[in-house]
Structures are given as C-alpha cells and as structure tokens.
Amino acid sequence: QVQLVESGGGLVQAGGSLRLSCAASGRTFSNYVLGWLRQAPGKGREFVAGIGWSDIRTIYAASVKGRFTISRDNAKNTMYLQMNSLKPEDTAIYYCAAVSRFSSPPSAPNEYDYWGQGTQVTVSS
C-alpha cells in the first residue's frame, strides 16, 4: 500500500494562490493514479482533479478548470495542486488519494483506495 501526506494548506484572500503537495511513501508511486478531492463543511467529498501514471493525462472538475493545475513528480514521489484565483467557495479540507486499479484517475471519491489526512484551505472574501 501507499501512505500519503498533504501539506501547503492555509488561509488566503480571494484571488490569491496556494500550492498543495502530497508526499507518498510505500509501494512504487508511479503505479498509482492520483487525485485531489475536497470536503467543505456540511457537504460530501467531491472530486477536484486527477492525474494518470505520468503527468500527461489530467482531468478537472468544471468548478476549478482553468484555475487549478495538477502535476506529479514520480522521481520525488510527490503530487501537487497549484490553485490560482481562489474563491471563498474553494474553502474545504483537501485530500490527496491514490488507486492502482485504474489507468485513468476516477472522479468518484469511493473509487480511491488510499487517502491522506487532509489539509485545510480557507479562502476569505
């Protein structure tokens, strides 16, 4: 299995930027497709972005497309989420997640097998 640890969350004003990181340990990192998902207060967990084994295949939720960029560095066992033009509605706990059963990143949260502990992102208006 793989262990995941997120970092980089914090408090930012609307329009600002943050970069989240997800460091992995355990089994071969490049064997996993990865995703960023988030959970806002009182809401269910939702898909944000996903990336395939390399950084060629990426998908995004409509709400973040054009503002967020997902990437991975297999040599460093790390995935990133660059978040620009942040909005108050982006406020949530952000989780990184991994699965090895698919060749493309799934958008359904319940398809992911491994999860980090989450990092809080708060965007003030």
Image (spheres, helix red, strand yellow):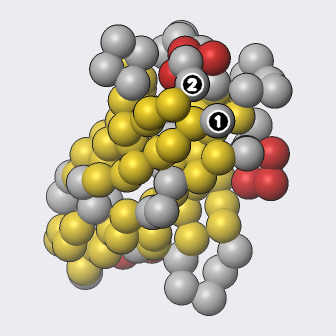
The residue positioned 64% from the left and 26% from the top of the image is 33
Residue placed farthest to the bottom in the image? Answer: 42
Q: Is residue 33 left or right of residue 123?
A: right
Q: Position of residue 48 (x, y in %)?
A: 57, 49
The residue positioned 45% from the left and 72% from the top of the image is 92
The residue positioned 25% from the left and 79% from the top of the image is 124
Q: Badge 1, how many Cα within 10 Å: few under 14, some, many 20+? A: few
Q: Position of residue 119 (x, y in %)?
A: 37, 64
Q: Position of residue 106 (x, y in %)?
A: 75, 37
**Pointer 1 residue:** 1
Quadrant of the snapshot with the N terminus: top right
**Toward which corner of the image does residue 14 lie, by quadrant?**
bottom left
Q: Badge 2, how many Cα within 10 Å: few under 14, some, many 20+? A: few
- Front residue of 84/79: it is 79
Above or below — where is 116 with respect to 91?
Answer: above
**What kind of element bears circle 1?**
loop
Q: Position of residue 68 (x, y in %)?
A: 40, 42
Quadrant of the snapshot with the C terminus: bottom left
How far apart, in angstroms, are the residues tagged by discs 1 and 2? 6 Å
**Pointer 2 residue:** 27
Three-letter code, disc 2 = Arg
